[in-house]
Structure formats: structure tokens, C-alpha cells
Image (cartoon, rainbow, N blue to C red):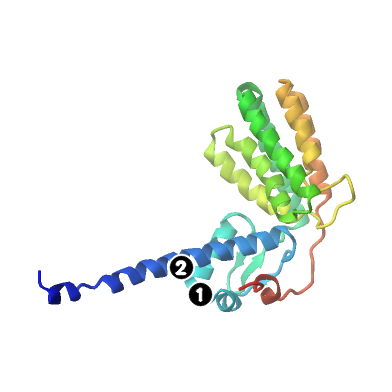
Amino acid sequence: MNKASKASRPATPARAPARERDNAVAVEERMYQDIYDAIMEHRLPPRTKLTEQTLCQIYDTARHTVRKVLARLAAEGMVDLEANRGAFIASPSPAEVRDMFELRNILEHAVLEKLGHTAGTRQIAGLRRMVEEERDCYLNGDRPRWIRLSAQFHLALAELTGNALLVETLRKLVSRTTLMIAKTEAPGHNACSFDEHETVLEALEKGDIKAAQAHMAHHLHLCEDRVRPDADDQFDLRAVLGKGL
């Protein structure tokens, strides 16, 4: 092959689309994580509108990337997509909140029933490490990670059942109820408390399924009591999501 043939290879153009795809994926993931964290930290409260044009400008990306992120958040129950109106941070009605916690109680009762017969020492030890990390994050003031771990504890229990459909159903319920829990809590009554998680594990470790279920029901009841009313404030997406970009 002569030098002219080698020089005519379209090497650079071939790499360009791959780089563009990688950049789009990175932007998509960063946008998703930024919005998710802002919702869970209550920096973007329920009913905040997520304007596509503004998100495009903040992240310097195309509308189809924004729409992929919004669809992903909607599938997880974090965002409501309303025809001809756009995307809003989810804001379940009081009746829906009651229904969601009732369904969570039913599902998590069943999870503990199964785990009471199948969970081993190693699995419970893994859950205990999660609760310890949850406690450390709370005490160290790392609220974003504490909130994520608080929610993840319930999903980690469900994952041990091996039932993927149950996990996906619970994931949406956990996300949607967690975003409604009050931003500030009285000392010793923090949302999705690690102490309450610990009592569930202690009963599970002893093989006392009924006690574990009772502790979980009490815990979910306290979480429901912490749900705050809808916020009417208007928030600037650029002020919340545009930092550091």
C-alpha cells in the first residue's frame, strides 16, 4: 500500500462520532445525577418545572438528551410528564401518598416474610454495613449520600428476594415517597432513620419475622408522618443545577 493510500484513510472522522457519543452519554449521566440529587436534597421541591430549553442551555446539549433524562426520572417516579405542559418534579396528592405507603407496607411485609426464611448471616452483615454507612453520613453532614443510602436500604432488602419485578415496583415507590419527606426533621426523628433500620435487622437476625415486620410497619408509618405539604415556591434551575458547569 502506498503513502497516498494510507493518507486517504478516514481515521479521524471515524473516531469523531464515537467521541460525540461518549460525550453525550457523560452529559446525560451528569444531568440525571444532578437532578436526582437536587430532588432528594429538596433543592428542587415538588412541582418545580424542568424546562427543556433551560436544561439544554445549562448542560449545552440537545433536546433529545434532555428528554431521555426526563423519561428516566419519570420511570423512577421522580418526575411527572404532563401532556402539553412539560416535566415537573413529582408531587403526589395526599391520597396517593397514603396509597403508596400502604402498598410499600404490603410489599415490604412480604419481603421480610421471605427473607426471614432465606437470609443468611453474610447477607444481614452486608445490610448492617449499609446502615453503619448511613449513620456515618448523617453524623458527618453528608445529607445527599445519607438520603440515598436510606432509600437504598429498602431496595437492598428487596433485592435479596431475587424478584426483579418486586424490586422495580418498590424502587418507584421508594423514590416517589422519599422525595416527599420533610427537608428538616426533629432530632432523633430523621427521615428513614438508620436506628429504625437497625431494629428491623436485629429482629431479622434473630429469626423473629413478625417482630421485623412490626418494626418495618412502624418505620414506614413514621416516614409517612414526615411527609411535608406541597411547596409553592418557584425555583431557578440555573441557580440549582448550573453551579460548577
Residue appearing at x 77%, y 43% in the figure: 135
Instruction: Tell me the SS state at disc 1.
Output: loop
Whether residue 8 is visible, yes or no, is no
Which residue is disc 2 drawn over?
Answer: 23
User: Are discs 1 and 2 less than 8 Å apart at CB?
Assistant: no
Residue at the far front in the pictured view = 3
Q: Residues within 10 Å of mark 1 (few under 14, many from 20)?
A: some
Measured as percent of width and height from the top left, residue 111 is found at 64, 32
- Spatial separation of the CA atoms under disc 1 and disc 2: 10 Å
Residue appearing at x 17%, y 72% in the figure: 6
**147 vs 173, nearest the viewer:** 147
Report the mark closest to the observer, 1 or 2. 2
Q: How many marks are shown on the rendered structure? A: 2
Measured as percent of width and height from the top left, residue 89 is found at 67, 64
Q: In the rendered image of this protein, does residue 110 appear above or below residue 34?
A: above
- Which quarter of the rendered picture does the C terminus lie within? bottom right
Badge number at residue 61:
1
Q: In the rendered image of this protein, does residue 79 appear above or below residue 139?
A: below
Q: In the figure, residue 41 lies in which quadrant?
A: bottom right
Whether residue 204 is visible, yes or no, is yes
Instruction: Tell me the SS state at disc 2.
Output: helix
Q: Earlier in the sequence, mark 1 or mark 2?
A: 2
Residue appearing at x 79%, y 31% in the figure: 199
Residue at the far left in the pictured view = 1
Q: Is residue 160 left or right of residue 68?
A: right
- Which quarter of the rendered picture does the N terminus lie within? bottom left
Residue type for callout 1: Thr
Residue type for callout 2: Asn
Measured as percent of width and height from the top left, residue 150 is found at 72, 45
Q: Residues within 10 Å of mark 2 (few under 14, many from 20)?
A: few
Residue appearing at x 58%, y 41% in the figure: 167
